[in-house]
Image (spheres, helix red, strand yellow):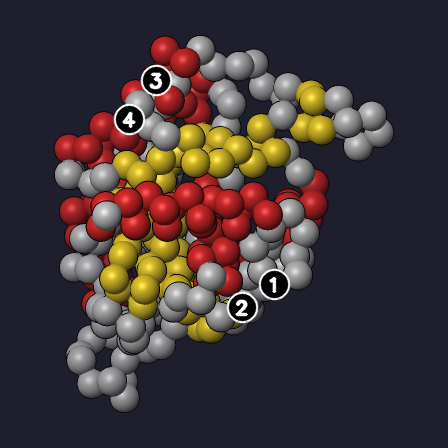
Amino acid sequence: MAAVGAHRTLAVASGKGGVGKTTVAVGLALALRQRGPAVGLLDADLYGPDVPRMLGLTRTSEARHLTLWSGTDSRQRPRPVERFGLKVWSSQFLVGEGQALAVQSSLAGLLLDRSLGTVDWGDLDWLIVDLPPGTADLQQQLAGRLGLSGAVLVVTPQDVAHLDAKKVHSMLQRAGVRIVGGVENMAPLACPCCGTSIELFPSTPESRSIWGLGVPQLAQIPFSGAIGQAAEAGQPAGAPGSASSEVFTELAGAIVAAFESDTQ
């Protein structure tokens, strides 16, 4: 089931956790919003929903039971939370910040259906979906239900990150999802003292990378303390006036250009 009214639905995916997938999803959504379109951001990582924290949104009270809403009455449908002009929905809004969403995959699928079809998203130009990392049953359900216009893969310059991302690439291809491109996060660090480029990870041979599969590299995000600190403070890169937003602006431009080329 695709989100109601979304002109384009774009997944941000990774093969493993810890590569900065959510940082990229949030920064990209904010950068797209700065271009003018109506943008929604769905945190589909049910078991590790970090989008709200990065946007400075926190629910402190714990839920005693999980209620799955239903119905199509607009007066009863939940609405996304608005932050920095984005429409945001996450399972974190249903439970306390430190409370686990302990649900089985079948119930998780139902919860995602409700997040997509019952939440009152309104009309969106873009829906950015922060997928859970990996290729388990939940990710496969999402790839089949979202009606994706495309996907962006996030990796770090590590062999294991590329190895696991190639598995996601294969899963998405089987589902008929277009791979728009990839983002390399935590790229070489520029020394703050002398500007020397420091390789934090051993380089991955192209033959073992997603680039070797023909995935276009859309952006290279440097390892930056400013980006991490901004997210921790709830003012992520890509938000108005934030530090290090240029790279996400360029990423958003590359993605828009990739879709616009389809219509030319």
Question: In the rendered structure, are the residues bearing label 2 and label 1 in contact, judged by CB atoms less than 8 Å apart?
Answer: yes
Q: Residues within 10 Å of mark 2 (few under 14, many from 20)?
A: some
Q: Which residue appears farthest toward the right when viewing the image?
A: 193
User: Disc 1 on helix, strand or loop?
Assistant: loop
Precedes in sequence: disc 3 or disc 2 = 2
Residue where numbered disc 3 is placed = 212
User: Quick one: SS at disc 3?
Assistant: helix
Could you say where residue 162 lies in the image, as x and y percent from the top left? 40, 23
Q: Which residue is mark 2?
A: 84
Q: Is residue 50 visible?
A: no
Q: Classify residue 151 by image quadrant.
A: top left
* Residue denoted by label 4: 167
- Secondary structure beneath dot 2 equals loop
Pick whichever of labels 4 and 1 is earlier in the sequence.
Answer: 4
Choose the circle earlier in sequence order: 2 or 1. Answer: 2
Residue farthest along the front direction in this orientation: 264
Whether the residues at callouts 4 and 1 have beta carbons within 8 Å, the answer is no
- Residue 252 badge: none
Give the numbered dot on residue 240: 1
